[in-house]
Image (cartoon, grey):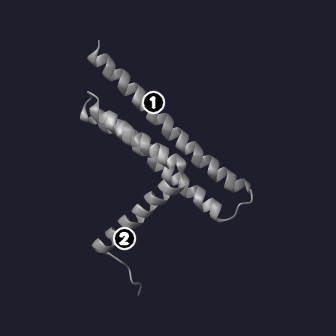
Amino acid sequence: MTNQVTGLRRIFNAAGYSWKGFKAAWQHEAAFRQEALLGVIGTLIALALPVSILAKLVLIGSMVLVIIVELLNSAIEAVVDRFGGEWHTLSGRAKDMGSAAVLLALLWSLAVWIVLLIESWHYYFP
């Protein structure tokens, strides 16, 4: 029989692994640091904007999506790099697809911010 960790211990362990992941991304990934700082600034701006709570959540959520995708992209890159520095078609494809996912998340976030800012501008300044 396996010795599985369950209940609160499993939750605490998972939180610890997550914290290690954030710490590693901050230490080793410049893009993560940039996007995280942009997320903090954007969150402060979103909270200060005269928009609904739902609009604030959508603005902040679009930035959280970028950070999530960046973490996944960084994980893909770390796994690919783990298996050697020599170039391989599949390794390049995996890294390019991860990068494309980050680009799509960034473009989505930008579109959300533009649309909601234009909408709120027209609401307050008809």
- Viewer-proximal residue among 1 and 71: 71
Q: What residue lies at 45% left-to-right and 59% top-to-bottom?
A: 23
Quarter of the picture holding the C terminus: top left
Residue 9 vertical placement versus 35 (above, below): below
Label of residue 13 in the image: 2
Report helix, strand or loop for mark 1.
helix
Q: Quadrant of residue 7?
A: bottom left
Looking at the image, how many numbered discs can be counted on the residues? 2
Q: Residues within 10 Å of mark 1 (few under 14, many from 20)?
A: some
Give the residue type that dot 1 points to: Ala
Residue at image location 41% in from the left, 31% down from the top: 112
Q: Nearer the viewer, mark 2 or mark 1?
A: 2
Please state if 26 lies on the left or on the right of 55 as rendered. Answer: right
Local secondary structure at mark 2: helix
* Kind of residue at disc 2: Asn
Location of residue 99 in the rendering, given as x and y in whole percent from the top left corner: 59, 45
Place of residue 84 in the rendered image (x, y in percent of width and height, measured from the top left) = 69, 64
Residue closest to the eye, 65 or 38: 38
Spatial CA distance of label 2 from label 1 is: 37 Å
Please give the residue where the numbered disc 1 appears in the rendered image: 111
Note whether 84 is above or below 60 in the view shown: below
> 85 or 101: nearer the eye?
85
Q: Residues within 10 Å of mark 2 (few under 14, many from 20)?
A: few
Looking at the image, which residue is at 51% across and 53% down? 72
